[in-house]
Amino acid sequence: MSSSSGKPLAVVAVHGVGYRDARATAEQVRVGHIQSWTRHLAVGMGIETARLALDFAYYAPLLHSGPTVQGPQDTDELNDPLAKELIAAWLAELGAPRRVAQGALTMPLRYAASWVAEKFSLDGRLTELFIRVFFREVATYLADIDSPARAAVREEVAARIARHRPRVVLAHSLGTVVTYEALHAHPELQVELLVTMGSPLALPHGVFDRLIPAPTGAPPARFGLRPAGVARWVNIADPGDPVAIPPHLARAFTGISEDLTDPIHPTFGFHHAKNYLSCKATAATLAPFLGL
């Protein structure tokens, strides 16, 4: 498969949370993000967008069965027991006092958001919104190893990779979890470079322990494995990104070639895909594989 310019498609991108847009068709959303992700990559690499060929695996609608569109007015509490459990594990890994971490199971969401906002000097309202969106979608994906939604999301990403056979797969946030599972489920997919950005893959007692395939070994020496079809795996994390906890995936996964940190943004943009896409670490990692 080639891009519209006739070049072999070099990159397939996989998004994180908060991408569902019920106001547009899936194709419209996908095309829009192809343009924006290409633009941010090009800015970081100092090149024209025409020199990049990128496709976008859009799986967000598969995680939503209802018409709700999440946004600034989304003020519902998180009542999903798994979401609360994941928040408690996340807070504990961030170093929250036990009363704060355990309180996430019973207290309002703003209780956890307040502590995180203070620790990272963030806006409390935006932090609460982010936690709600992030953990709602992560819990939906991880809820059941046999859930149709999880399988459909995984297969959507695998199908997009199979269609283009790209040199590079670029995954962000929850997309790193989906991509990890998709590539393990399809070892026939050969990828020269997998780049994970802002990844929660190693979150203990949360994401890590719910992965498919399950980590190998006995606690505490348990490890996830690099997917068989991936030749090189590079992880990039902002040291201040509270989603990428712990930031160094090589502590929990074998076969990682480089575990890089790059401060992508000094304020609330700590986890935004656009900042990871345009950071120096991403540019340096991708350049040799894109012929630049």
Image: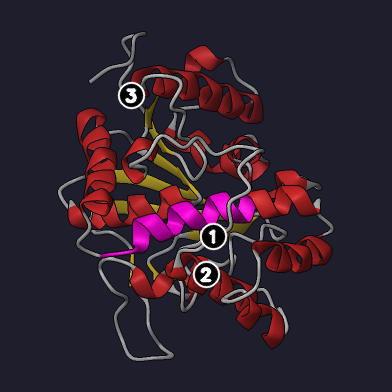
Q: Are marks 3 and 2 in contact (CB under 8 Å)?
A: no
Q: Nearer the viewer, residue 5 or 28?
A: 28
Distance in Å between CA atoms under marks 2 and 1: 7 Å
Mostly what secondary structure, the magenta segment?
Answer: helix
Q: Earlier in the sequence, mark 3 or mark 2?
A: 3
Q: Earlier in the sequence, mark 2 or mark 1?
A: 1
| Residue type at tag 3 | Leu
| Residue type at tag 1 | Leu
Q: Which residue is mark 3?
A: 9
Q: Nearer the viewer, residue 237 or 190?
A: 237
The structure residue drawn at horizontal position 52% and vertical position 23%, both measured from the top left corner, is 38
215 vs 44: above or below: below
Q: Are marks 2 and 1 in contact (CB under 8 Å)?
A: yes
Q: Nearer the viewer, residue 212 or 230?
A: 212
User: Residue 48 lies in what quarter of the image?
Assistant: top right
**Residue 84, which numbered label?**
2
Distance in Å between CA atoms under marks 3 and 2: 40 Å
Q: Which residue is mark 1?
A: 78
- What x and y, as percent, mark residue 286? 50, 38
Q: Residue furthest left?
A: 188
Q: SS class of the residue under badge 1?
A: loop
169 vs 209: above or below: above
Residue 262 in the magenta stretch? The answer is no
Q: SS class of the residue under badge 3?
A: loop
Q: Which residues are magenta?
A: 130-144
Q: Nearer the viewer, mark 2 or mark 1?
A: 1
